[in-house]
Structure formats: structure tokens, C-alpha cells
Amino acid sequence: MPSEYIKPNEYTLYGLPTTTTQPQVYQASLLVDSYLRRPEGMVWEPDSFGMPCYMAAYSPDVTFKSAGSIAPGASVAVGLTVQVPLFESFLGRVAILDRADPALVEAVVVEKIATGQLTFANVVNSHNANCTIEFGLTIREERSIPNGRAITRVARPPVRILSGMGRYGYGRRTDQMLGEYNELNLLAAVQTFGGPPVWQPFPINQASYSEMTREVWVPAGLLMAYYSDVRLEYVSGYAYSALPPIIKQGTATIVEAFLQNPELQGQLKSISAGDTKIERFAPSQLDVDTRRQLDQYRIDMFI
């Protein structure tokens, strides 16, 4: 569902009349998300243990139902109600189980795939047959690792990393000239004869994330060599109860602009009738002061 940064019981706290409607708050919240460059929104929903599980504003892109019950454990194979062939792209993906039930909802990682069957690396809760299995509710990023290093950065802090995949690519030309890829070692042979680079999962409990720098330290893989590329799947933002007040105030500012000058919504910047003229103060519903306060949560396009 769309972001909703102000609840009805908070309208008067942020200077809005009690007649404010939910669609107005939805529209203002979407404009805040647009300015922050966060289509996933700023709010996550918790799992059954209260930990960040999935993004509240996302909708699933793929949904399955389990053919039978799902028991807790490691490497849990789950049959699906539809016998469809699954693509390799499902490996390492995060699925949300029983999203509608706060007592059972959890995030699991796909470890193996087969026709009509998924194997999850670890399941914590017991789930009944017809359990909903949803993909696309978390943030995914693919990053290149700097040469000879194990550090990358994420665009959307703060984060809780749920899944990590790495692969080895072909060496840079400078490395080849220096003889580091002279095809005399096992890693070079894998790169040369193994076909396209294969994505391999790495244990996220061995990775490290810094909230100060947004850097993620990725553990080494095969033969203790650092990956060339990594895929991270994670949850970012805040629980609604911990949402920064400036996010709420920015939403209220936009709603207030809607209420004061409803005729100036959208692309219209000014309106006149006879000697009377009304002009919007800026080409945005957000004033300069509010934008400056929101900038600390805005995504960097280049990291």
C-alpha cells in the first residue's frame, strides 16, 4: 500500500485539521518519497520477533502458495501449489512467509530451486498449508566491489541485510597485463571454462555494515578471493513508531498546501482572475527549509 506518514490521531499535532482525508495524506507521502528518491518508502514492517522484515510500501511481484505445511529448520524444501519451472534468478532471493499474520510472518532466503519447489535456507516459525510466499517486498541492489577489496556501499540507510550473493567476474585489463589472470590457478580456470560467472550466497552473519559510512564489508568466497560483484537484499528505513518527525512534518506541509490552495496542485504555478493573482511560491510543494531538513534522508544517486 502507499506510504502513509501521518495517522489520523496525529493530524492536529502537525497542524492539520481533523477533516484531513487519508487520500490527501497518501498523495503527500508519495511526494515526500519522490523527493527522497525512495519509491519503497521510509517504513518497514516487522517480523514475528519485531525485527525489520519487509517494506510497507512495496507490493509483491511474485506470489506462491505452499502445497503443504512448512516446518522450522534448515534447508527446508517447500512444495508449491503450482508446478511451474523456476528461474535461477530466484536463488538468493528473500521471500516473505504469511505476511498477513503478525504472529507468523518472517523473511526466508531461497537456497535451492526445482520445478514446483523452493528450498529455504532457514525457517523459524511453523506455517500451515497454503502459506503465502511473496517475493519483491525487500530492496535489491547489485554493486561492483573495488579491485582487491571487500567493501561496497548501500544507497538506502539504515539497513538490515537479509541476503547476500557474490560472484567472480573477469579480471580488469590492468590485472591481466600484470599476470594476475594468467590462467595458471584454479580461480582463473573457473572463470575461463565455467561459463557465465555464477552467483554464490555468502553468510550475512559474516558481513558487517556501518551506519556511519553506509559501507558493507563482504566476506571472501572461493579460495579466499574477494568477489567482483555482490547482490544485497535488505530492508531500510524505520518502524512507524520511530519515523523521524521531519518526515511527518514534510508530509503535513504538503497536505497544508493542498488545503490552502487546492487550485494550485499539480503542474499549475499561478492563477489569476481580473486584478487578483495567486502564485505558488516555488515549483515544488516543499519549501526550501523543509527540503533542507529532508536532504539527510535523500538517496545519493552516485555512491
Image (tube, rainbow, N blue to C red):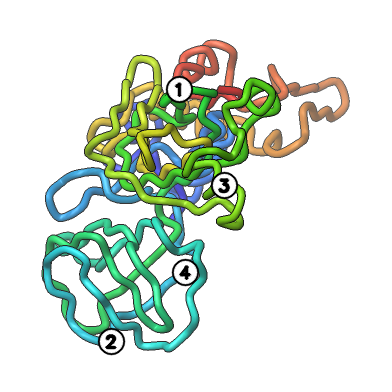
Sequence-first disc among 2 and 1: 2
Is label 1 in a helix, a strand or a loop?
A: loop
| CA separation in Å, label 2 and label 3 | 39 Å
Residue 61 place in picture, x, y as percent: 50, 64
| CA separation in Å, label 2 and label 1 | 44 Å
Q: Quadrant of the C terminus?
A: top right
Query: What amino acid is found at the position of numbered circle 2 in the picture?
Result: Ala
Q: What residue sits right under mark 2 in the picture?
A: 67
Query: What amino acid is found at the position of numbered circle 1 in the picture?
Result: Arg
| In this view, 35 is above or below 87 | above
In the picture, the disc for residue 149 is 1
Q: What residue sits right under mark 4 in the picture?
A: 62
Is label 2 in a helix, a strand or a loop?
A: loop
Sequence-first disc among 3 and 4: 4
Q: Does residue 65 appear in the picture of this structure?
A: yes
| In this view, 278 is above or below 237 | above
Graded by Cα atoms within 10 Å as few (under 14), some (14 to 19) or many (20 or more), the crowding at tag 3 reads some
Query: Which one is nearer the viewer's eye here, 228 or 10?
Result: 228
Q: Are marks 3 and 1 in contact (CB under 8 Å)?
A: no
Query: What amino acid is found at the position of numbered circle 3 in the picture?
Result: Gln
| CA separation in Å, label 3 and label 4 | 32 Å
Residue at the spot x=35%, y=42% of the render?
A: 235
> In the figure, is residue 101 to the left or right of 16?
left
Q: Are marks 2 and 3 in contact (CB under 8 Å)?
A: no
The extreme front residue here reads 184
In the picture, the disc for residue 191 is 3
Residue at the spot x=42%, y=24% of the render?
A: 151
Is label 3 in a helix, a strand or a loop?
A: helix
Query: Which one is nearer the viewer's eye here, 32 or 87?
Result: 87
> In the figure, is residue 190 to the left or right of 280?
left
